[in-house]
Each structure stands twice: as structure tokens, then as C-alpha cells.
Image (cartoon, rainbow, N blue to C red):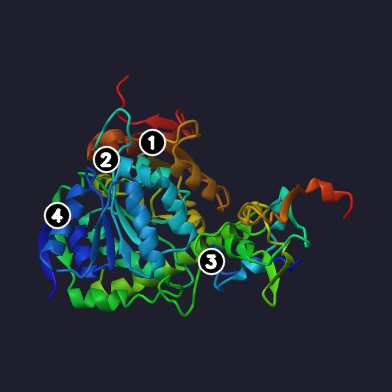
Amino acid sequence: MRKIVALTGNDAVGTAMKQINPDVVAAFPITPQTELMHKFAEFHANGEVDTELVLVESEHSAMSACVGAAAAGARTMTATSAQGLALMWEILYVQASCRLPMVMPVVNRALNAPLNIHCDHSDTMGARDCGWIQIYSENTQEAYDNVIQGVPIGEKNDVRLPVMITLDGFILSHTMERVELLDDDEIQRFIGEYQHPHSLLDTENPVTYGPVDLPDYYFEHKRQQVLAMERAKDSILEVGRAFADLTGRDYGLFEEYRLGDAEIAILAMGSTAGTAKEAVDQLRDRGKKVGLLKLRVFRPFPYEELGQSLEHLKVLAIFDRAISFGSYGGALFSEVRSALFGAGRIPLVTNYIYGLGGRNISVEEIGSVFDELEHVAQTQQIENTITYLGVRE
Amino acid sequence: MRKERGWQEIPIGGLILEAGNAEEYETGSWRTYRPVKDGEKCIHCLRCWIYCPDSAVLTEDGNQVGFDLEHCKGCGICAAECPPKVRAIEMVLESNFEEKE
């Protein structure tokens, strides 16, 4: 039976993992993810899952255990944050490049140094080129729903890629929200039984994983990964439609919020999208033609679709919750701006780097950004292409 | 040489789906030293065949008949394992053969 309950983001994702009932989970604690795996370990200790829970000595080992388990044909999961994701780095590429599906919730947190345990997106944005699908969550319900959808998205036979589901550290992970939990059975029917085409344990059909791949074939294997990422887009949409049929909650590559007739808009990922919706509503009440594009899927990056959705705008501000040092603006800014270059017409585009190390972003601040954008629309002049929002001078 | 296949013709992820196919891939060119056998001294005890890590020692009817130079890496284990009183295998610098071949 479905239940409506109040849960923190960590507890909701831990519950999704319980309901998925993975074959293998590797666990290593790190703030703010710790309570997520704590919750799952509690389910495990109570005998509520059939999972082999592997307690490892580092995140490098956690991801390595996941490579082995996934190659053996197990439905595999782990979870991490920030430094933990950084320590997994090498193996993130191995998992994706061996074409081993798994789902990993990442509770977004700033990277050291200086030491900071609060939310920004520098951890997962830094991992944007490692070959994983990346889906960002606006709220706890989305985090729960995305983790469940992540399983069939990555396991689809013409995709076979691992999936990161992100949720903002503390803002979502430690805050209690209303969540509609699906029934265990309907989740099991939705994700289906995992059929691994090349299990290491299938002795009738021996297979070698991770052999040396010299200049004569390595490039070809990378080209295959490009195709898998392209196909992942269809898989995300297909799974999203099936999920909407099941729950009534519709998920695409991104969400357009009062965007259709908007002249000015911002683009954001994660919980900030929720804050921005409130700002948009307040300005709409005052007759301002403003809107929001909430990007859900960052990898594969939906450049064509974004171009079509944004080209009608006069001014667009991209909100990056991470810095790409030495780059021209944040990574999201660079990619969206590049996507627009191929669109019919190009709006004026600015970049706001915000919220680093958990710095709060308020409805009022987003409102003041819209004021700035209105000024840009009137003057057709961008004074500062890149703004570090809220940094004290 | 096998024809090099395109990216859509090969298994994904660098997987190798057939057992023992290293035989089809020539790896002998890595060799610096080549094992050379003195047929007069060899007693066909096959210790070299047992110890060779690359299965590159060739036999016929229980006799040692030479080396598979397409896969021998020149590690010299065969020469080291050849019984001290026999010493039938000598490791010779590969460059010595270059001009002749």
C-alpha cells in the first residue's frame, strides 16, 4: 500500500534502496550521506532486505566492490558525498567504461579545502566527464523517485551505464518533507528482474572484464560510450513516461516552469529550483514575464531540447553551484551557452555562481537577480557576465 | 594481421567474450631476449614447457621442438629452469637477429 510520510532526504533514499532490494551494496560513511547508509544498514540488520552489505575501508574500495559485484551480475548500489566521490574517481571511470550499470545517490557537498560539509555541486559537477548518467533532484520526493527510476534507466540493454542521483546536502538530506512512498511490490514490478548479459559468474560463457586495450581499439570503446549516452536520453524519457503512468508524477529531461511566455528566465539544478519557483510566482503576481528552467538531467546533456526551450527568451541567467576554476563561468553556463549557439536565436546569457559551501540562497536574492536581468533586457547590455552572488566585497 | 574492426562491430566495454583468444594476438614483438635452444644438449625433460608463463614452448610427441616466437616475451624463465647439468637454452639479444631476418 502506498503511504504518505514525512521523511528526511537521506531516510527517503535509504527507503528507496530498501524497496529496490539490491543484490549488493557497498557502504562507507561520509557527511552528509552517512544517515542514508545508516538507514539502509538498519533495514539490513532487521532482515528487511536480501542485500549483501559490504562494509569497506574507503570509498575507493566501495566503488571497487561495486565494479566486482556489477560484473558478477548483481544489482549494485552505494552512496557518497564530496571527498568520498573524489576518492572514488579512478573507479568511477572503470564502472562506466566497463559498461556496468548501478545506481549511486550522491548527497551533494562542497569539496575541501577549507573543510566544509555543506551543500554545493562541486563534487558531482567535477565528475561530469566520467561517463555516468547524472540526474539532479529538486526535493525529497524527486530524490526518492529518481533513485527508483535510475535502476531501469541504466540497466537498459542498449545503455548499460551507471547512474548518479544527486540530492542537495542538508538542504534535502537532513530536512523532513512530505514523501509519497510506493508499494514494495509495484517498485519490484517497475524495475523488473535484472538480467545481466555478461555475468562473470556465468562459467558456460566466460568473459574477461578490463583487459588491456591498446591504441588499436581503446578509441572504438570510447565511441561506444558516446552512443550509450545518446541512448540514455531515450531511456530516461521512456522510464519517465512509465513512472508517470504509475505515479502521476511526470519527469522529463528538464522542467519548464512558467517558461513558455517568459521573456526572462533562470536555469538552475537541485533544490534551488524550488526556491526559484517561489520567486517566479511572486514576480508573476506583479505581472513580470519571468520563468524557470529546472535542469534535471545534466548527463546526457540535452543540448538540442534546451536550445529549443530557451531560444525565445530575451535574457537567461544560468545558476551554477560550482566553480570551474580558470574556465569562462561555471560548467553549466559554458554548456548551456554552447547549446544556445546552435539554436535559432540566442538570448543574452549571464552566469551566477552561488551557494558555495552551503551559502544560503533566498527567494529575495533570486528576486533581485530577476531585477538585474530585467535591466539587462531593457538596456540590452550585460554589465557582468559572471556574478559571484552573495560574496562579500 | 587480423582486420581491425569498427566501433559498432566489437563487444562493448572492452569485454572479451571468448576464452583463450590471447593466442590470436601477437605479443612476441615485446621481446628483448630470444630463447635459443641447443638441440644437442636438450634432454626433453619439458621443464621449460611446464614453467613457461605464456605457453610459448612447443612440443611434439613429448619432445621440446622449439618456441612460439609470436607469443614468447623473452622472460628467460625457460633458460633459468633448464636443469643445471643441461643448460640447453640461451637467451640471445633480439637485435642480433634483426639483420639476418
Location of residue B59 by image quarter = bottom right
For mark 2, give the secondary structure.
Answer: loop
Q: Evaluate whether residue A291 shows in this view.
A: no
Q: Quick one: A360 or B17, which is closer to the camera?
A: B17
Q: Is residue B39 above or below residue B30?
A: below
Q: Is residue A330 above or below residue A154?
A: above
Report which residue position mark 2 lands on. A119
**Mark 2 burial class by Cα count in 10 Å: few <14, some 14-19, many 20+:** many
Please give the residue where the numbered disc 3 appears in the rendered image. Answer: B15
Alpha carbon distance from label 1 to label 4: 28 Å
Which comes before the other along the chain, label 2 or label 4? 2
Q: How many labels were placed on the picture?
A: 4
Q: Which of label 1 and label 4 is nearer to you?
A: 4
| Circle 3: residue type | Leu
Q: Nearer the viewer, mark 2 or mark 4?
A: 2
Left or right for A349, reference A62: right
Q: Nearer the viewer, mark 2 or mark 1?
A: 2
Using a 10 Å C-alpha cutoff, classify the residue at mark 4 as few (fewer than 14 neighbours), some (14 to 19) or many (20 or more). Answer: some
Identity, as a three-letter code, of the amino acid under mark 2: Cys
Distance (Cα) linking label 2 and label 4 = 18 Å
Residue on which disc 4 sits: A177
* Sooner in the amino-acid sequence: mark 1 or mark 4: 4
Q: Residue at x 84, y 50 (%)?
A: B98
Disc 1 to disc 3, C-alpha distance: 43 Å
* Disc 1 chain ID: A
Q: Nearer the viewer, residue B39 or A170?
A: B39
Q: Chain of mark 3?
A: B
Quadrant for residue B63, please give it: bottom right
* Image spot of residue A1 (x, y percent): 12, 76
